[in-house]
Image (cartoon, rainbow, N blue to C red):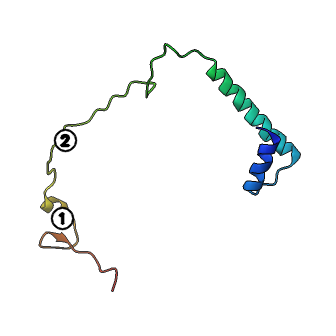
Amino acid sequence: MERDVLRRLCLLNQLSLTDTQKDDVINFFADRDADTATLNAIDTENVERMVHVMPVLTVVREDKASQPFSREDLQAGAPETDEGYWCVPRVLE
């Protein structure tokens, strides 16, 4: 990153940086540019593309409709029910 670009970014984002902080930001991005150059220099021509580093195994059950609980069992602990519905206190008047 050049000083002129950093100056424009500071103006755009309303940042006030000291000279030491500006040097730190410039050095940080210079290091990132060096890291990127190092990664770009690696030959990946014969490397197979992948989405995940580790194999992904999804263990799922068969998707089928079922009713594991009956309405009566679920409502057995309810304080009050009416014709198969839970009765709750009124919140709005």
Q: Residues within 10 Å of mark 2 (few under 14, many from 20)?
A: few
Residue 42 lies, in percent from the top left, at 60, 17
User: At 17% across and 70% down in the image, what residue appears?
Assistant: 85
Would residue 80 be found to the left or right of residue 90 on screen?
Answer: left
Callout 1 secondary element: helix
Q: Amino acid at mark 2?
A: Asp
Frontmost residue, 2 versus 71? 2
Q: Quadrant of residue 88?
A: bottom left
Q: In the picture shown, does residue 24 fall above or below 57?
A: below
The label on residue 75 is 1
66 left or right, relative to 36 = left
Q: Residue furthest top?
A: 46
Task: Classify 84 as above or below 43.
Answer: below
Q: CA distance from mark 1 to mark 2?
A: 26 Å
> Which quarter of the figure has residue 32?
top right
Out of 86 and 44, give the one closest to the viewer: 44
- Quarter of the figure that contains the C terminus: bottom left
The extreme bottom residue here reads 93
Q: Position of residue 79 (x, y in %)?
A: 23, 71
Residue 93's disc is none
- Residue 3 in percent (x, y) is at 82, 42
Question: Can residue 77 be seen at all in this image of the molecule?
Answer: yes
| Residue at the spot of label 2 | 63
Residue 76 seen by the camera = no
Q: The residue under label 1 is which amino acid type? A: Gln
Compared across the picture, whether 68 is left or right of 10 comes to left
Q: Nearer the viewer, residue 30 or 12?
A: 12
Residue at position x 14%, y 61% in the image:
71
* Residue plotted at (29% across, 78% down): 89
Query: Residue 77: x percent and y percent?
Result: 21, 64
Mark nearest the camera among 1 and 2 is: 2
Say left or right for 11 vs 20: left
